[in-house]
Amino acid sequence: MAATPRTPSVSLASSVPLASSVPLASAVSAPGLRERKKLRTRVEIRRAAYRLFAEQGYEATTVERIAAAAEVSPSTVFRYFPAKEDIVLTDEYDAVLEASLRARPAGEPPLDSLRHVLAEALAALPAAESRELRQRAVLLARVPALRARTAESIPGTARALAAAFAARSGRATGDLAVRVSVTAALGALREAVLYWGERDGEDDLVALADEAMAALATPLATG
């Protein structure tokens, strides 16, 4: 039996998708030929899925239809994406995120570093990827199964963030303050994306993500 590829982790971009923006992608070494082929297959499956989701809705789109549109077998889809929800929620950029955070100036608070990295990534998105990002957010807001899957599968991104936050703060990855900061950041970004998706992606996501991160450091005023 052929080896199963590593399951992609849930993206910060089910919080805010980092996609493949040039500034971030340059932060890690280029993958080898085999990994590029796997990535190309994943991208083709995702693109086919998004086309079908737009045409016939998420619930009506089966894995078999996605496989046919991507010209692969259903078993291939399941090798790369164990569940249909993962086609929307996962990507391969946790390592890029971690490297980009580590590359920020020394002494910069970890949450500030994350705000800058996300702003750069979102600003650099090509038009086609921006449309896909909007579609992901709208789906996340409208499909309960996607939100449930996010809650089940976030640890991969959390580990990448924890490693970067720990390195920048001089703490251990398991330190309580690091864990709380990571959990709070992911929660804030998830809510920003849900807010954006609930409004059909009409607002400025960069501003919403920045506002969500700023809210972590600003207590709510009492009425």
Image: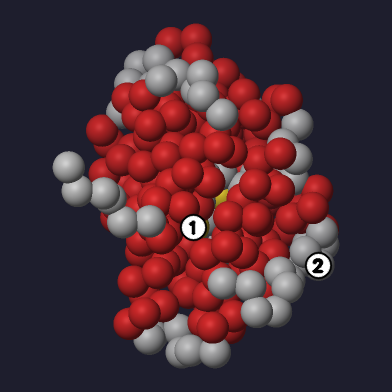
Q: Is residue 161 above or below residue 213?
A: below
Rendered location of residue 99, percent (x, y): 69, 69
Task: Give the residue pinned by disc 1.
Answer: 9
Mark 1 or mark 2: whose residue is earlier in sequence: 1
Q: Is residue 98 above or below residue 196?
A: below
Rendered location of residue 66, percent (x, y): 51, 26
Q: Secondary structure at mark 2?
A: loop
Q: Residue at x 59, y 80 (%)?
A: 168
Q: CA distance from mark 1 to mark 2?
A: 19 Å
Q: Is residue 139 left or right of residue 6?
A: left
Q: Which circle marks residue 29 in the picture?
A: 2
Q: Is residue 141 above or below residue 119?
A: above
Rendered location of residue 8, percent (x, y): 52, 56
Hey, what amino acid is under mark 1?
Ser
- Between 190 and 136, the residue placed more toward the observer is 190
- Between 178 and 2, the residue placed more toward the observer is 178
Q: Residue at x 38, y 34 (%)?
A: 194
